[in-house]
Image (cartoon, rainbow, N blue to C red):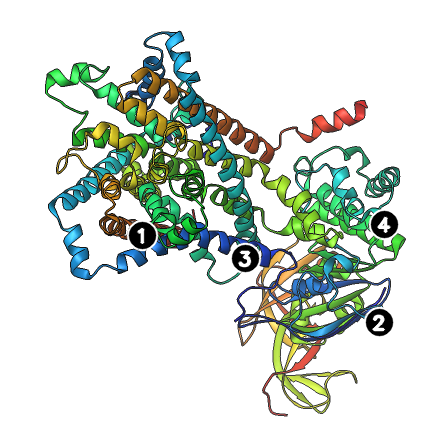
Amino acid sequence: MSIEIRNIQKRFGDFTALENVSLDIASGELLALLGPSGCGKTTLLRIIAGLATPDSGQILFHGQDATDRHVSERQVGFVFQHYALFRHMTVFDNVAFGLSVRPRAARPSKEAIRDKVMKLLKLVQLDWLADAYPNQLSGGQRQRIALARSLAVEPRVLLLDEPFGALDAKVRKDLRRWLRQLHDDMHITSVFVTHDQEEALEVSDRVVVMNHGKIEQAGRPDEIYEHPASPFVTQFLGDVNLFHGRVHDGKMEIGDYAHALGEHQTAAGGAATAYIRPHDLDLSREPGEALAAGTVEHIHAVGPIVRVELRREGSGDLIDAALTKDQYQTLRLMLGDRVFIRPKKLSVFLDAGADI
Amino acid sequence: MASLSTAAPRGIATTEPAWVRYTFTGLALTFLGLFLLVPLVSVFAEALAKGWSLYLDALIEPEALFAMKLTLIAALIAVPLNVVFGVAAAWSIAKFDFHGKSLLITLIDLPFSVSPVVAGLTYVLMFGAQGWLGEWLSAHDIKIIFAVPGIVLATVFVTFPFIARELIPLMQAQGADEEQAALVLGATGWQTFWHITLPNIKWGLLYGVILCNARAMGEFGAVSVVSGHIRGETNTIPLHVEILYNEYNFVGAFACASLLAVLALVTLALKTLVEWRAARQLGNDVPLEARARLAAAK
Amino acid sequence: MRFKQHSVLPGFGLGLGYTLFWLCLIVLLPLAALLMKSASLSAEAFWAIVSTDRVVAALKLSFGASLLAASLNAFFGFLVAWVLVRYPFPGKRLVDALVDLPFALPTAVAGISLTTLYAPNGWFGQYLVPLGINVAFTPLGILVALTFISLPFVVRTVQPVLEDLEAELEEAATCLGATRWQIFSRVLFPAVLPALLTGFTLAFARATGEFGSVIFIAGNIPMVSEIAPLLIIGKLEQFDFLGATAIAVVMLVISFVMLFAINLIQWWSSRRHGMTR
């Protein structure tokens, strides 16, 4: 089922949680809402579910206005951040709950409920825990039971609030892959909220980056990563080095260095900042055509990527560079060495309030 | 609820020398012994001072039996009324955010800090012969003061906060996540309340009921003001105890008092049991591995 | 600003409506009736009633004895809570359950039992009276009864706070070179103080209003051992409703002040420790 979000506005007292947010979610899509805490992503998810009401704007399910539809009639599955498993019920009763509270006419028979619940428990690979109580489960198990419970009512949309937030790193990785798999099998429209960019980029079909109640950018994970639309998105998606300069004649000029900008990058001129990821920096001992020179201050050589910290000459800024083991060995870098850096790729944004 | 933690063994750095520990323990136990245990024991000792037969005679005397009946009636009406109130108040206070919440909580606690005698007086001023509604009530031949309804009202007043006070913090701590999950799964409001909220608060509710009942059956001051002490008509057990005592019928007084003391002991036992059960419900009682082995064995 | 935040949970109107209705019917309306009644008195007449020697003596006795009883309980209650939380001894569970006895035992029972114990031929009285210590039918008896009925308050407010104190706190203090006494007075006691004050105030409030246990042991001698609640009942029995109301209003105002004090202590301690109890 498709979801259309139109001009949603939501305030809590003086705090604006969502400002004029519009978004289309295609049927069968797995969408990630990504942003720092307080950016409004959870509020948006709760509004889609019907757990919160917008001050203005509309939510359309499959083209029909669902804004005023009560949460119990929206047929959504919601997985809560802390799972909200019913602590006094067994795992079986938790999963069966949604079916057993239906009005008598619409309620499946006891046997049908049992079959369905056991099928779901098998799906989440926890059928051996049917008689356990929630407080006897590990975090990852609770998460999967919460998911099974929300799937039992055959929701048209699956909404997950920080689904991996409370788990430790190893379990997180497994569950992420497992959720992707599950979605590929069931093809149910799913939206999940996360503050972890790696999680969003790895799991979803499409990522929506939010900040201060607004959508900064929406797109496929590779699109977002390769072509971030704003300084915020660039910085939120990973470590980045900042270089201040000017855009002039379709070139980014930083001191004596100039870098030709592609067509999709800014055409206007003015003060600008270049954002360069550590692995987009080349280091060499040759001075020609370099963006800057620096001295090696730290080398972290554990793992496949070697992280080098440079002190930039002139400004004294710290620059992070990431090399492969091969590059590192070819360069034979030592602490205190003088090296020159060249960017392979950079994102340029005009500074806010700069003259154009 | 008070809980008795199984205190972790304390290191040498965090406890006192043995003689200090023994002195403190001895002092505390002596204090509790003299002030609590001896009075409790003396009730039974006095009741049985003239032998079992006199004790039993005092209990099956018609006026004593009537007092027991009235006490039960008052508690049977007052406690359920306060259960309904307590659940309604805790639901609206714990699950919703609204202005004036803390004022409301303070007002609910108010009867705890009003002297029972003052409480009784307020009802006399409301419903008594010369009270606000006195004329109207006597014109319609409704008797509240010096009658059973007054006793019930006074009992409701003094036990008013018991259940709400127990439930509000409990429901606040539990939050509204489970209820929201139930609604998302399609449950109606009542289904959510019966299947999710009520089972989660049952131990707290029971705890409140036990304390509320003990106070309801034992209340003296407020009931004394509104009852009029009419024998065989408006005497509850505590009031009957007073009358017998003032008539120097010590065996009778202490026999009835011993009933109330038994009630108190039962209350304490039930209360401890509920605390224990509630604590067990919270903790992980059966470890996961044991469960897995059980499942595998099936 | 809206009165209530939006929520998907149903039943707010019904729940709050019923709560307010019942609160008004059982608590607020009767108290309003009391205040209305007292408003029919002129200020002079009101003052004339509450400033008679007998009333002043009764109020002084009620509040004085309550203050003493609450102080006694602050000391012993703290000690009991301390021992229950920190020292192992056989029968601890039983003792812990017994602490709540005054909450469960009807006050009239406590009253006749204490009176009999301290009467000249009672278990305690037979040893105390020859020493010249008269408890029964004196203000000292009132103190004993009030101590009994307000005993659990301090224990039950202090106990959970002591349980929550981390052993690391004391270990850290020991590593920094503090003695046991310094740790107690500078680390532990300040942490428990708000709870102790709350318990003290609760005990005091409960003691001032107490009636059932006191009337038996007090002897009720005007100007000597007559408490304020008894005076109210005396006035009622003589159909002096105005007199009873005036004394009741004074007691009510004082209990409101104490309620306010409890809230203030809790507000203060939650601000200081960043947590609410």
Per the model, the C-alpha gap separating discs 2 and 1 is: 59 Å
Residue to which mark 4 is pinned: A106
Residue A286 on image: x %, y %: 69, 73
Per the model, the C-alpha gap separating discs 1 and 3 is: 25 Å
Decide if residue C274 is in sight here. no
Res B293 → quadrant = top right
- Residue at the location (22% across, 32% down)? C143
Per the model, the C-alpha gap separating discs 2 and 3 is: 39 Å
Residue B184 on image: x %, y %: 73, 54
Res B198 → quadrant = top right
Mark 1 element type: helix
Label 3 Cα neighbours within 10 Å, binned few <14 / some 14-19 / many ≥20:
some
Residue to which mark 3 is pinned: C17
Residue to which mark 2 is pinned: A63
Q: Closest to the observer: B110 or C22?
A: C22
Indicate which disc residue C256 carries. 1
Establish if C11 lies above or below A170: below
User: Which quadrant is home to the C terminus of chain A?
Assistant: bottom right
